[in-house]
Amino acid sequence: MSDSPSTAAHEVLRLLASSKNVLLSGPPGVGKTRLLSEIAAAFAAGELGSQGMPTLSHGDDVAIQDAEEAKVFRTVFHQNSKYRDFVTGLAPAVGEGKAGQFTIVEGTLFRAAQHARQEGCASLLVIDEINRGPAVQVFGGSMVAIEADKRLSPDGSPHGLTQFFEVMVPPSGLIEEYALPDRLFILAVQNQADSSVEPMDVAFLRRFEPYRLDPDEAVLRSHFQIEGGQQRDLPEQPGAVADLAEASIRAWAAVNKRIAIGRGGDFQIGHGVLMPAWSTALSVAEATMLLAKAWDKLMAHVAEVFYGDIRSMAITLNATESSGEESPLKLVEHTFGTELRYALEGESLWTRDALYRGLRSIAGT
């Protein structure tokens, strides 16, 4: 392949090879979507290794079976996702003269399975935002058949553990027993920080091999071209763009540490949120403008995580009464009738003068 898959892609491909089903998870901004695209590209690429799999730069191949034609199928779950959209079912027919008629539709899982049933073929089914839809209802009876040992044999024949489920087979509409092929691989992604959705069913989750991505400071340091392990004190004023980048990384790490304590690790902020286009040739003013936009997104995430809890926001941003005079933001108490209310007040954090000072304050330096 022209671009060697990353270590993470290599690990996920290995998990897919062994367990057939993998669930990617992690906070927003850690690179789940990017990894998803990388894996899909590696799977679908025509340059296959000696056993019909993507050839990687790590010295060996990933055993995604012997496939001459690897195809990627994609879907996104949402609140209105239905079994018929994913497996098969009846849907209103569309077209002139078809009013009141129905047709049998093929869902994404069924189409992926049918492709993988063909000799020399393999399918990767990518499910984004799997926890936004009613996953158990959408999978229906197929849920019991997705595990690796419940599939058909590599030659397409059933064995003692093969699980069948009933489907309405297009185009006839006849109900038949159906089993999933060995060369069907399912890669799903969930955002655990989404508080608007219910936790996923444990019995459903255990059918997937988990793979988690976490915020990675090393990625940020590589992006900003700053060596790690520096214990130097930050200057009071940024003398170079490296000072701004270092302050930003330290502030990001401090915010994540406080979020993990106050809300949990799933609500932290990924490194991808803080990676604007960057060059060491930037002026301090240009770098400040780029980082200000990135921190605007980061602040919006903090506000969402602690929605309505101003005091927790202030703690996360180190803007409480005990945080000192350096912070541009301050937690202020107000009375509303007989009730005590809090507000974050102060100058805008995103001006040239306030940003660096604010980052130092958030970092606690």
Image: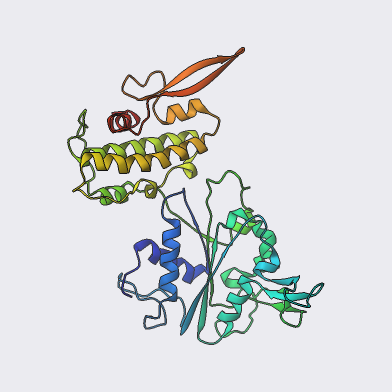
* Figure quadrant of the C terminus: top left
Quarter of image, res 164: bottom right
Q: Which quadrant is home to the N terminus?
A: bottom left
Task: Return the x and y of residue 146 as percentages of the image width and height.
Answer: 61, 69
Task: Locate residue 241, reporting x and y percent.
Answer: 21, 41
Q: Is residue 262 left or right of residue 91?
A: left
Residue 279 is left or right of residue 275, and the answer is left
Q: Name the residue furthest front.
A: 96
* Between 203 and 320, the one nearer to me in the picture: 320
Residue lying furthest top in this view? 338
**Residue 300 shown left or right of residue 226 in the figure:** right
- Count all numbered tags in the image, as a single digit: 0
Q: Give the residue drawn at x 53%, y 69%.
A: 20
The type of colouring in the image is rainbow
Query: Quick check: 142 above or below 78?
Result: below
Residue that sits furthest to the right in the current view:
100
The residue nearer to you, when weighing 130 against 347, is 347
Residue at x-position 48% and y-position 33%: 262
* In the rendered image, the vertical position of residue 253 relative to residue 319, given as above or below: below
- 294 over 110 or under it: above or below: above
Quadrant position of residue 52: bottom left
Residue at 26%, 51% in the rendered image = 222
- Tell me the quarter of the picture where residue 55 sits: bottom left
Residue 245 visible within the image: no
Is residue 104 something that shows in the picture? Answer: yes
Q: Residue at x 31, y 23 (%)?
A: 326
